[in-house]
Amino acid sequence: MPQSQVESSVHLAESFAIVIFGAAGDLTKRLLNNLKRSSLLPQEFAIVGLLTLL
C-alpha cells in the first residue's frame, strides 16, 4: 500500500497509553522517536515502562 494511502487511513486516538516490557533498551528509544517523527502520537499519551532486574 502506498504511503499516502496508509496515512489517509490512520485514525489517531485522542489519548492512549503504551506499555513497554524491557523499556530500557535502544529499541524502545527508536520506536518512540519514530512515532514522534511520524506524528502518530497524540497530544495526550502515557508510557508505562517495565524492566525486570534479576
Image (cartoon, rainbow, N blue to C red):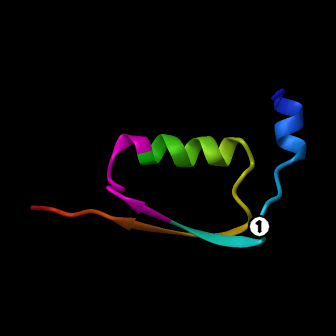
Image quadrant in which the N terminus is located: top right
Nearest the viewer among 10 and 50 is: 10
Q: Is residue 33 magenta?
A: no
Image quadrant in which the C terminus is located: bottom left
Residue, far front? 1
Q: Is 10 situated left or right of 51 in this image?
A: right
Spot occupied by residue 16 in the image (x, y as percentages of width and height): 65, 71
Residue at 83% x, 57% y is 11
The region drawn magenta spans 19-27
Spot occupied by residue 29 in the image (x, y as percentages of width and height): 46, 46
Residue at 82% x, 50% y is 10
Q: Element under label 1?
A: loop
Q: Is 52 situated left or right of 15 in this image?
A: left
Q: Determine which quarter of the picture holds residue 23.
A: bottom left
Q: Which residue is mark 1?
A: 13
Spot occupied by residue 19 in the image (x, y as percentages of width and height): 47, 66
Q: Is residue 45 above or below residue 2?
A: below
The amino acid beneath tag 1 is Ala
Spot occupied by residue 50 in the image (x, y as percentages of width and height): 33, 66
